[in-house]
Image (cartoon, grey):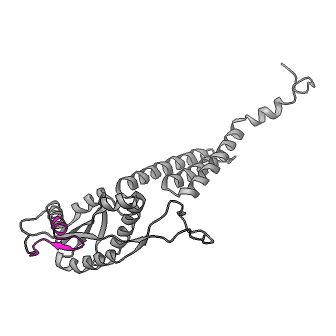
Amino acid sequence: PTPAGDASAPRFLGPLSDLLAAPDLARLVFLIAGAFIALAFAARRGTFEGSLLWVTAASALALLDVPSPQAPTLAFTAAQLVLLLGLIEDSYLLAYHDELTGLPGRRALEEALRTLVGDYAIAMVDVDRFKRFNDRHGHGAGDQALRMVATELQGVGGGGRAYRYGGEEFAILFPGSPAAAARQSLEEVRVAIAGRKFAIRGPDRPRKKPDSPRKKSRPSRTISVAVSIGLAGPNPKRTTADAVLRAADRALYRAKKEGRNRLVAVGDKIPGARS
């Protein structure tokens, strides 16, 4: 073995061994990982990215020279719990939350239907001629239209709660409100959607509003969409929420058949149509 003070020993071995020392290397790795995770969190701010940020911080604490021997174990345990909770919450959001519109999704609707008791109303909402709209203006404009409709539905009165049912179809639940009471709120939101104009986002239009507005090369096109609505509530023949939902869907079909951009409730007398 080479004596410690031997001048013939390679000079780089000392610094290299220090660099490759486990605690120092781990701290360096966590520092780099923390920087990347912080950037990902700043860019997306998702639940999972936030969890990784805290996991990295807790794991880094475990590498510090803390007198207590239990400190690293506690820090790593906390990191695992934070990561587990983040994964659970992220999975929940994927299953119950619609990313495009920001509304609760279909699984959230199914759970809400199971909790309905007493008097309530269910409305089914569908964007009129949405396929034709997509074919003419493009899927980007279609996404804009869905987000606009979702924004209006979120503000529906009467205690209604909007859900993305699928495609261009939405559902609104009115717990504790009969169909007759929900009707006025639905008419108001239908009129608001039909009267709202929005500009089609061009391919070169930035997602976020710039600090200094750019000169427009051409005027923006403004368009609008309309919705049809079917409304139903429970009665002695419709005792389950699923039956009420199906009845609202049939009423929606009648609204489409009678010219669209209208609200039809189960039991409405429409000339030329069967109830």
| Viewer-closest of 204 and 72 | 204
Horizontal side, residue 162 vs residue 178: left or right: right
Q: Quadrant of the C terminus?
A: bottom left
Residue 82: x and y in percent read 50, 51
- Residue furthest to the top in view is 1
Q: Quadrant of residue 204?
A: bottom right
Residue 199 appears left or right of 123: right
Q: Position of residue 263 (x, y in %)?
A: 20, 74
**In this picture, is 264 found above or below 71?**
below
Question: Which quadrant of the figure contains the N terminus?
Answer: top right
Q: Is residue 266 above or below residue 169?
A: below
Query: Furthest residue to the right?
Result: 7
The front one of 232 and 138 is: 138
The outermost residue toward the front is: 218
Left or right of residue 120, residue 204 in this image = right
Q: Position of residue 124 (x, y in %)?
A: 23, 66
Q: Is residue 237 magenta?
A: no
Report the residue at 18% width, 69% height from top: 255
Region rendered in magenta: 253-269
Query: In the image, residue 126 lies at what x, y percent?
Result: 26, 65
Inspect the magenta stretch and tell me whether residue 254 lies in it: yes
Give the answer, above or below, for where 150 lies relative to 90: below
Residue at image point 61% right, 54% down = 39
Q: Is residue 132 visible?
A: yes
- Residue found 44% across the figure and 70% down from its top: 221
Q: Visible in this render: residue 119?
A: no
x 26%, y 68%: residue:
172
Q: Observer-nearest residue: 171 or 254?
A: 254
Q: How many marks?
A: 0
Q: In the drawing, does residue 3 fall left or right of residue 121?
A: right
